[in-house]
Amino acid sequence: MEKFTKIQGVAAPMPLVNIDTDMIIPKVFLKSIQRTGFGKNLFDEMRYNRDGTEIEDFVLNKPQYRSAEILIAGDNFGCGSSREHAPWAIADFGIKCIVSTSFADIFFNNSFKNGILPIVLPQEQVDVLMKDAEKGANARMTVDLEAQEITTSDGEVISFEVDAFKKHCLLNGLDDIGLTMEKADSIKSFEDKAAQERPWV
């Protein structure tokens, strides 16, 4: 998993509330257990017409937001089913950070495991970031995980909280497999000792 330290990029405003995982990635696309290839179907029903053409006024189809790395979202983002394909699609599109007043628990935890930083802030601060994001491509925000700060395009600094363990994992690019591999020497030592003590196993 790629390390997350600091990003400076365009933030896309998506003030809709209760965006569920089926809106993020419709179930019709859940045909693979690979983590890549889902970005083109992110928010599929909101991004495309039935004939496959783009819906021009959808935020991620607008030229200024096509390369957005930050999403400023409405309340209760990621609710619905527990599908891990939702953060896969978000990450594959290129979004690395989502800011909202609240997230569904499973989606929140799955995001960290897939290199995405979900940030919870009070409504007043989300409103500030939403307004800044509406400025388009010229408004670039900075999200600094180490300092736990978001800096708007106007230089306003907003602090955020993040669990220390989850922060460690993101900063070091550690998913569940990476965490296990950190203990590789201890695991090998245990297995070698077990093999000597119980050679019949």
Image (spheres, rainbow, N blue to C red):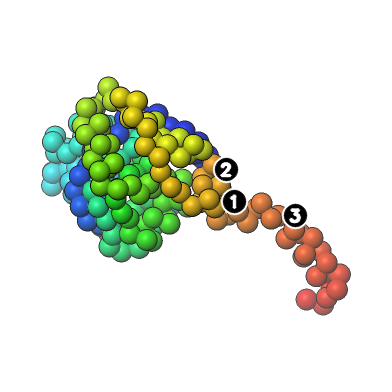
Structural crowding at the residue carrying mark 1, measured as other residues with C-alpha within 10 Å and reported as few (<14), some (14–19) or many (≥20): some
Distance of mark 3 from mark 2, alpha carbons? 18 Å
Q: Which residue is mark 1?
A: 178
- Disc 2 is placed on an element classified as helix
Q: Which residue is mark 3?
A: 185
- Disc 3 is placed on an element classified as helix
Q: Residue at x 30, y 24 (%)?
A: 154
136 with respect to 57 (left or right): right
Answer with mark 3 or mark 2, whichever residue precedes in sequence: 2
Identified by mark 3, the residue type is: Asp
Task: Work out whether residue 64 or residue 88 is closer to the camera in this orientation and state it.
Answer: 64
Q: Is residue 31 visible?
A: no
Residue 62 to residue 39: above or below: above
Instruction: Give the percent coordinates (x, y) of residue 186.
Output: 75, 58
Task: Work out whether residue 158 or residue 144 is closer to the camera in this orientation and state it.
Answer: 158
Instruction: Give the percent coordinates (x, y) of residue 83.
Output: 35, 60
Instruction: Give the percent coordinates (x, y) of residue 150.
Output: 38, 35
Q: Residue at x 33, y 59 (%)?
A: 104
Q: Label 2 near label 3: C-beta < 8 Å?
A: no
Q: Label 3 near label 1: C-beta < 8 Å?
A: no
Q: Which residue is mark 2?
A: 172
Structural crowding at the residue carrying mark 2, measured as other residues with C-alpha within 10 Å and reported as few (<14), some (14–19) or many (≥20): some
